Image (cartoon, grey):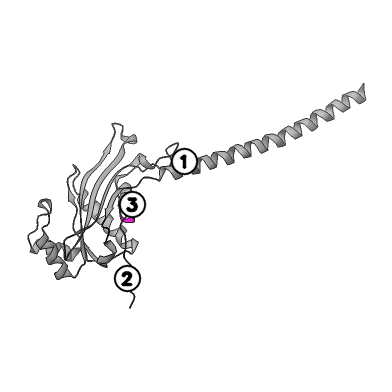
Amino acid sequence: MSNYMHFLSNQKKYGQKKYGVWNLKYCCSCIAIFILCLSFLSGCSFLHSPNNFRAKDFDEYKIKRVAVFPFYNRSNTMNAGEIVTKAFIGKLYDSGKFEIEFPGNVKKFIIGERIIIRKGIGADHIKLIGKRLNVDAVIIGCVKKYESEGKKKNARIPVISVDVRMIHTNSCSILWIGQNYSRGDDYETIFGIGRIRSLSALSRKLVNELIDTIPITDQEVN
């Protein structure tokens, strides 16, 4: 009897040991599957992209240097146009796609020519700035929405809508148009991961997506 009980005791210990190893492998497999699913969901969340148009003959214009006008603010948030314009210029500079005219010179031109941004920029002024500042194109934009939505302070979602276009200074042809409407939860996967919670962070993300859609032309290196 004692030998039999000893045999059962050994079998029980051995079985527990095997079960423990199997349980560990099972947990590791579940974690791996969870990470893969999370990665897949994260990838899906970043498929957000703006609407855009580009001229078929964009490459023929050989755009090298651009001037960015202050974006007109149609939102209910004060200084939203200035905030988004600054973010756009910064991201455009980082992209290295074009040389950018110093904003101070653009502002000086606007004041000197008595241009009112909310009334639009006429063809004559577009051609004039091209000659005066030696730029190939101008970029103008409009901030249509810049606010946080939601009643609960800790759960408010930033929402921004911006339209931007690039115009050739010599012909006044529209070379590119970008329209982007973004919400902070557009980038959310699960458990709130990826959600953008501030307007400033969302504005940087939004303009970066817009700039990614601007084509560049091959420039000959002298």
Answer left or right for 104 relative to 119.
right
- Picture quarter containing residue 125? bottom left
Residue 107 at x, y = what percent?
15, 62
Disc 1: which residue: 41
* Mark 3 → mark 1, Cα distance in angstroms: 20 Å
Disc 3: which residue: 209
- The residue depicted at 23 percent of the width and 52 percent of the height is 164
Residue 204 at x, y = what percent?
32, 51
* Residue at the front extreme, as displayed: 56
Label 2, secondary structure: give it. Answer: loop
Query: How many numbered dots are placed on residues in this image?
Result: 3
Residue 138 at x, y = what percent?
20, 61
Amino acid on which the number 2 mark rests in the picture: Gln
Asked if 4 appears above or below 55 in the picture, the reply is above
Magenta region, mostly helix, strand or loop?
loop
What segment is highlighted magenta in the picture? 207-222
- The residue depicted at 87 percent of the width and 27 percent of the height is 7
* Residue at the bottom extreme, as displayed: 222
Amino acid on which the number 1 mark rests in the picture: Leu
Could you say which disc has been placed on residue 219 in the image?
A: 2
Please name whichever residue, 130 or 148, is drawn nearer the observer in this view of the structure. 130
How crowded pointer 1 is (Cα within 10 Å; few <14, some 14-19, many 20+) is rated as some
Could you say which disc has been placed on residue 122 in the image?
A: none
Amino acid on which the number 3 mark rests in the picture: Glu
* Mark 2 → mark 1, Cα distance in angstroms: 39 Å
Q: Earlier in the sequence, mark 3 or mark 1?
A: 1
Q: Earlier in the sequence, mark 3 or mark 2?
A: 3
On-image quarter of the C terminus: bottom left
